Image (cartoon, grey):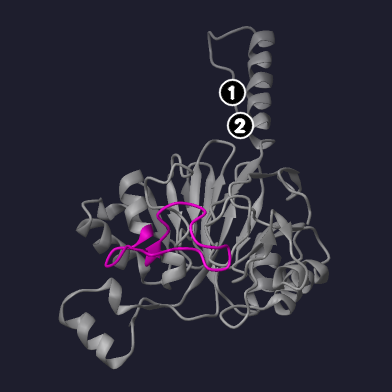
Amino acid sequence: MFTTKPFGGPSAMSWGLALLLTAAAGQAVADGEVRVTPLGSHDGEFCSRDRALIFEDPDGTRILYDAGRTVAGPDDDRLGDIHGVLVSHMHGDHVGDQRIARTNAGTCAAPDTSVSTLPQSNTVDIAVKKQAKIITGSEMPAFFAAKLSEQGGDAANSQLVRFGAERTLGGVAITTVPAVHSNGVSPGFLSGPLAEYLKAAGVGASVGPPTGYVLTFSNGLVVYLSGDTGITAEQQLVVNGHYGAELVVMNIGDTYTTGPKEAAYVINDLVQPRAVIASHANEAATHDGKLQTGTRTAMFRDLVKVPVHVPLSGRTMAFDGDGQCTEGCDGS
């Protein structure tokens, strides 16, 4: 940016000092940390249904990723302010077809998520109450716009960002990247004759392909959110080659996504980040906050060549612009 001294303005010395102070202030923002807080079903654990993460930019922008079933609705006091909501795809464990009533109900392996959110979703309920943007790709924005309207929200808060494009929210640049999975909308989210026809046929409505996300924060940190996916060429060509992701949230649960061995290959050989947060393990991975041997998460940790951070619910992790964890991570 070029800056010129205005006519009749301050002296050269004071103007130079002003520029230095401005630069220092900008550097302070750039040097801030991104804070990542898991919202799982059981405090201090990494449990079978855990998906949700809150990312907070140094400028205060707060983004909820895949609210799923372990956020206790829009009044969950762990949420705080939410400015944006990301949804990788429309499956119930990500968009939230049901939810917990409170934390620590049921077990870590089988949490009590018996509160139905249909025909809306946990995602829509949260977005309406928080007046947050829902930012998605594919054909999902039209679906969410209709749901927001039905719930008394603003349809304009459902916003599109397609592959190769970019949308900013506060200090965060957001784009979507390909994921290889399915993305059908269950008839339970629909109403009227169409819902009945789809249910009878045993199929769901299509809203285009699923997505992952790449987020670029104001401190320079680039984060790849894999969503539910298998191995893709774009993980090397786009996520690594173009965006240079330094921190990855990697789904490792097997059957529905990459398993621990496949996910380790993605990390070690394709994306090659500085660190990774395990996600979507579909197991009670910890007990008393300690990673259990024989779990998929433990296998993934042992196979990966960079630090693997276990997302313990309610424990905030902080990351600098290079993807190094500076607080709240034990490297387990």
In the image, taking residue 71 as reference, residue 200 lies left or right, namely: left
Amino acid at circle 2: Phe
For disc 1, the marked residue is: 4
Nearest the viewer among 18 and 257 is 257
Image location of residue 296, percent across then percent down = 71, 73
The reply to whether residue 244 is in sight is no
Image location of residue 113, percent across then percent down = 43, 63
Q: Quadrant of residue 89?
A: bottom left
From which residue to which does the magenta span run? 96-122
Nearest the viewer among 46 and 25 is 46
Nearest the viewer among 55 and 288 is 288
Does the CB distance between marks 1 and 2 fall below 8 Å?
A: yes
Image location of residue 38, percent across then percent down = 58, 52
Query: Residue reaching furthest left?
Result: 193
Amino acid at circle 1: Thr
Secondary structure of the residue carrying tag 2 is loop
> Disc 1 and disc 2: Cα gap in Å?
7 Å
In the image, taking residue 110 as reference, residue 25 lies left or right, namely: right
